[in-house]
Amino acid sequence: MLRFLTAGESHGPALTVVVEGLPAGLAVTVEQIGDELARRRLGFGRGPRMRLERDDVELLGGVRHGRTLGSPVAVVIHNTEWPKWSEEMSPAPGATTKPLRQPRPGHADLVGMQKYGFDDARNVLERASARETAARVAAGTLAKLLLAELDAKVLSHVIQMGAARAPADRRPGPDDLTAVDESPVRCFDRAAEAAMIAEVEGAAKAGDSLGGVVEVLGYGVPPGLGSHVHWDRKIDGLLARALMSIQAMKGVEIGDGFEVAGRRGSEAHDEILWDDDAGEYVRGSTRAGGTEGGMTTGGLLVARVAMKPLSTLNRPVLRTVDTETKAETVSFKERTDVTAVPASGVVAETLVALVLASEALRKFGGDSLTELVRNHDAFITSLR
């Protein structure tokens, strides 16, 4: 199984992630991680800073001469803006800065202050910030590279921004990731793309923010990942937990999700068919999202996650309370985007990849990549 742990604050010197459980022999480069992080920074509605900078990535352990060693992999993402924040975020004792005491509705500010006994919201918001997802994308890049060795791909696309929604029958294939990323809002449908851009422009003009829905697709996922035998091993539960752990996410559905609840059973399930040419079972639809009984079926994996509008607004209008005076005020303003939905799809991809890679390692085992691939191929062959 894969395990990973991230550390670091949004405006601290760096973010760090340690990934344990990767087999030896997986090809990894700093450039591959940097490319995925660059995808996370783009998207219509993000600030100009995101478009100009590239994350400074360093591999500190677990990789030698471009290959994993089987030991924990340590990745550091340096903060290029650290000099501007070195006093504000100094770890040294005795530093004095003006505390933030106007917590933002919808953010972790107030509850975090109450939970940990802080009088400064910055002690909370720096770690609660979605900047932490950069470390998870770095970890997820390693998972995506591992899945590629098993002929599996994970990609995402935006299906809703505000009120604009793409048609359900416009779904990218396994080789369409470049086409998705070329869209300013990472939408595969060009008509819906235009409507989404209009939604973002309207929110930006009003100084407001915008949420949306991302769909994550898994192609070539082998059957049998996850298990029916324990609640905490069910693949749909693992996916839901991972996706809901992303900052600002408020809902997850696998396959047709909530829509299935309004159908009769004859229209809610995926019929089982036999493909003579491929010599394998196939499903006639994707209503269950590629899972049954807590396990992957071998069909297309489909998961959707809904992101709320960002809680930091360019025109602060939401009422809050000053935690020192208890006087009514408006929430403070940090530098923010109009929306981060396109970028959230990249994060969602990596979290799904981490779950699938972890369960693939659990099922197929192997200390080296060669052993893992051999075990995987033998299992697939046995099914045919």
Image (cartoon, rainbow, N blue to C red):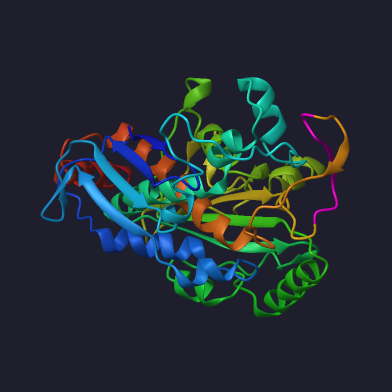
Residue 298 visible (yes or no): no
Q: In the rendering, at what x and y percent does residue 369 appear?
A: 18, 45
Above or below: residue 159 compared with residue 16? below
Magenta stretch encompasses residue 317? yes
What stretch of residues is rendered in magenta?
Answer: 316-324
* Residue that protrudes farthest toward the right in the picture: 328
Tell which of 71 and 338 is nearer to you. Answer: 338
Tell which of 122 and 198 is nearer to you. Answer: 122
Locate the N terminus and report the quarter of the image it occupies: top left
Above or below: residue 154 compared with residue 178? above
Q: Residue at x 40, y 61 (%)?
A: 36
Magenta stretch encompasses residue 3? no
**Drawn side of residue 28 relative to residue 300, left or right:** left
> In the rendered picture of this protein, how many numbered marks are placed on residues?
0
Above or below: residue 296 compared with residue 341? above
**Drawn side of residue 88 relative to residue 26, left or right:** right
Q: In the rendering, at what x and y percent does residue 184 appear?
A: 59, 75
Q: Residue at x 49, y 20 (%)?
A: 230
**Drawn side of residue 88 relative to residue 119, left or right:** left
Q: In the rendering, at what x and y percent does residue 171 appear?
A: 59, 66
Q: Main secondary structure of the magenta part?
A: loop
**Drawn side of residue 107 relative to residue 374, left or right:** right
Q: In the rendering, at what x and y percent does residue 177 appear?
A: 46, 69
Residue 15 visible (yes or no): yes
Tell which of 179 and 370 is nearer to you. Answer: 179
Q: Residue at x 70, y 28 (%)?
A: 111
